[in-house]
């Protein structure tokens, strides 16, 4: 699974791109846990469950799908920080 990081804060802790090999399928929540396990400094980045948006193969995944949407090897994931405007 190829992962691109669009957050400078998260990228400073894990790198701009990751290549992870997983067994079977995992959810977005599982992916976040896997990143934290491999890069403990990233733990604070995922403390707000709504801060990051995930795109999988060009499709945005909604927050309510994070526990059910299945990722597989070969997927292209982009981790995007939420943007608020005023």
Image (cartoon, helix red, strand yellow):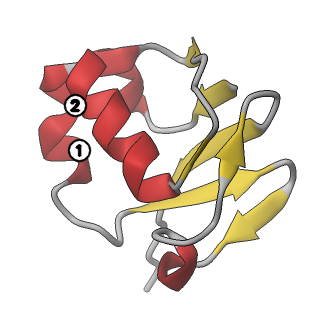
- Residue in the picture at 79% in, 37% down: 75
- Residue in the picture at 41% in, 23% down: 11
- Residue in the picture at 67% in, 47% down: 71
Where in the figure is residue 18, as x and y percent of width and height?
56, 16
Where in the figure is residue 69, as x and y percent of width and height?
63, 66
Residue topped by disc 1: 45
Few, some or many C-alpha atoms within 10 Å of disc 2 (few <14, some 14-19, many ≥20)? many
- Who is closer to the viewer here, 57 or 8? 57
Q: Which mark is residue 42?
A: 2
**Snapshot quadrant of residue 32:** top left
Q: Do the residues labelled 2 and 1 touch (CB within 8 Å)?
A: yes
Quadrant in which the C terminus appears: bottom left
- Who is closer to the viewer here, 9 or 14? 14
**Snapshot quadrant of residue 34:** top left
Q: Eyeballing the image, is 39 above or below 58?
A: above
Q: Eyeballing the image, is 20 above or below 66?
A: above
- Asked whether the viewer can see residue 83, the reply is yes
Q: Eyeballing the image, is 13 above or below 32?
A: above
Where in the figure is residue 62, as x and y percent of width and height?
60, 78
**Snapshot quadrant of residue 36:** top left
């Amino acid at each position: 699974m190829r992962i691109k990081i669009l957050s400078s804060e998260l990228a400073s802790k894990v790198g701009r791109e990751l290549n992870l090999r997983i067994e079977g399928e995992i959810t977005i929540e599982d992916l976040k846990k896997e990143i934290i396990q491999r890069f403990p400094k990233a733990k604070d980045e995922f403390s707000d469950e709504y801060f990051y948006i995930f795109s999988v193969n060009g499709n945005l995944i909604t927050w309510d799908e994070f526990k059910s949407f299945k990722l597989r090897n070969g997927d292209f994931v982009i981790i995007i920080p939420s943007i608020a405007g005023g």
